[in-house]
Amino acid sequence: MSIRVKLYMSYLAMVFVPFILMITFMVFIFFAGGIEDIRQYFDKEHNEPYRQALVYGELSYVLQNDTGKLEDEAYLNDIQKRLGELWAGHVISKNGVVIAVAPFLEEAAPGEDWQKLLDQPPAKVTFRKYHFETFKTVFNYPDGSTGTMVLFRRNDTVPIYWRPVSAAFSLTFIGLTSLLLTYFVSRSIIKPIKRLEAAALQIKDGDLSHKVVATTKGEIGQLSNAFEDMRVRLKHSIDQSLQYDENRKMLLSHISHDLKTPISAIKGYVEGIMDGIANTDEKRRRYMETIYRKATDMDQLIDELFLFSKLDLHKVAFDFKEIDITRYLEHFLEEQRFDLDKSGVALHYSSSDAKPLLIAADPDKLSRVLTNILNNCVKYMGDNTGSDSQDIKVSVKEQGAFILVEIEDTGPGIEEDDLPYIFDRFYRAEQSRNLETGGSGLGLAIVKQIIEGHGGIVWAENAEHGGARFCLKLPQSVAAKTVDVHEQHTDY
Ligand code: ADP
């Protein structure tokens, strides 16, 4: 529930809950508690003023015109009874002496000094926890003696304690409701805010491992989710920057090592030439050729390093185009065929599908991937002296939503233990063998970065006959599934 709705509900509850509680309380007191007079008041109130008007009117008439009736016991009883039903009664005196007190009054205030009240009636008196007002009338009896009548009439329909009690209960109900509402509403707002505060403090102290779980759905829940997103992103970016730092350190150590080796060799050969150790033209030519080869290796290494570090930092922009991978491979392999022939390597290409297989790819980067893998195949097949023929088979096929390109050689294959690591930067299996073949250990790391940049995956395995097989799995272009194959125009 949102905070706004919660506040609206609590405002409404603040108005209605005490009201309902008060009504319930009153109903309980009136009916269950058995306060008969109040119950009667509520039952009879509507015709009481009329009945009062009749009785008081009659009394007024008797006092002015027919005072003899006040000495008639039967009439006196009757009117006293009727007055009593209206919570009223009178005290009558003759020649200053009390001669009649209404039974209602005797019952309401037993033991009261009626003579005193008759002589000096106060404006208000309290009988049986009710306020009564007094009216004094002086009249003459038919025999000429002076009479006084004091009428006591209840002027408040509820007991005297009722107003403070109901005010106190109203205040208690309002206070209780507001306390409970404040507690529940603030608990549902303050508790999650406290949790967020604790998480923020942890983040401030560099601890990003604690998950922030949204326990409510409203604004605070959304805030918690946004906070959790922020934490995850922050953690990711910190982890990434730590990883980059680690990579940089590794790169630096490998670069210094990999550059040191050819530079030492170049230095050695140049010293040989300077010191006259290369004393024949033939020797000098061989020294110069070695220096040139080492410098070329270094150049290549620096190029690869440059590309790899850019890929690693995601600073290389991919220029994706929709291409037909079967035609792209045909085209690319045709270009390689001549050079491979010269190295004594036979290239075979097969595609299981006649229809175009469309992928979104950066053709230049893809060519870099294929070149690196083919170069490795040639390099490691040349290293495999036991092999009869040197063949590279390239095949392409559709596999669900993906396109699978397989490149297989007839070289020595890859040690099972090395398979999980050969795509790691600077990983070279059998270091000694690689001294002969050379290589930066970055070729397959570049392949992996580029293929992952295409949303694909790459792995290596050993073919049944022992050679190495590289598998590239690339997602089919989404458009390829919707556009009619006959209408497609691609670069390749
Ligand atoms: P390198 O510059 O050493 O070739 P790569 O990253 O290109 O570095 O390859 C990593 C390792 O994978 C190589 O050192 C080699 O041991 C192994 N490898 C790669 N391609 C082949 C292959 N076709 N046959 C056998 N081993 C290979």
Image: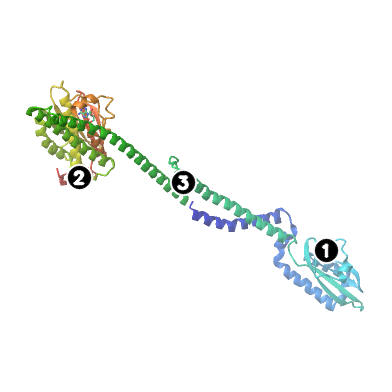
Q: How many marks?
A: 3
Q: Is residue 45 left or right of residue 148?
A: left
In the picture of the structure, the residue carrying the numbered disc 2 is 322
Q: Which colour assignment does the render follow?
A: rainbow
* Residue tagged 3: 200
Ligand 1 within 8 Å of the CB at mark 2: no
Residue sticking out furthest to the front:
275
Q: Locate residue 369, reporting x and y percent.
A: 20, 37
Q: Does the residue labelled 3 lie within 8 Å of ligand 1?
A: no
- Can you give x and y, in whole percent of width and height, for residue 5 in the image? 50, 55
Nearer-N-terminus badge (2/3)? 3
Q: How crowded is mark 3: few (under 14 residues within 10 Å), some or many (20 or more)?
A: some
> The C terminus lies in which quarter of the figure?
top left
Chain-order first, disc 1 or disc 2: 1
Task: Specify whether residue 218 is in view.
Answer: no
Picture quadrant of ligand 1: top left
Do the residues bearing badges 1 and 2 touch, measured as CB atoms within 8 Å? Answer: no
**143 and 109: which is toward the camera:** 109
Foreground: 415 or 438? 438
Q: Which residue is drawn at 90% across and 69% down?
A: 98
Q: Mark 3 vs mark 1: which is more N-terminal?
A: 1
Q: Which residue is drawn at 43% across and 41% down?
A: 208
Q: Nearer the viewer, residue 53 or 400?
A: 400
Amino acid type at image mark 2:
Glu
Q: Mark 1 points at which residue?
A: 104
Name the residue located 72 percent from the left edge and 60 percent from the top edge.
162
Do callouts 2 and 3 mark residues in contact (Cβ within 8 Å)? no
- What is the three-letter code of the residue carrying label 1? Phe
Residue farthest toward the top in the current orientation of the protein: 386
The answer to whether 431 appears left or right of 159 in the picture is: left
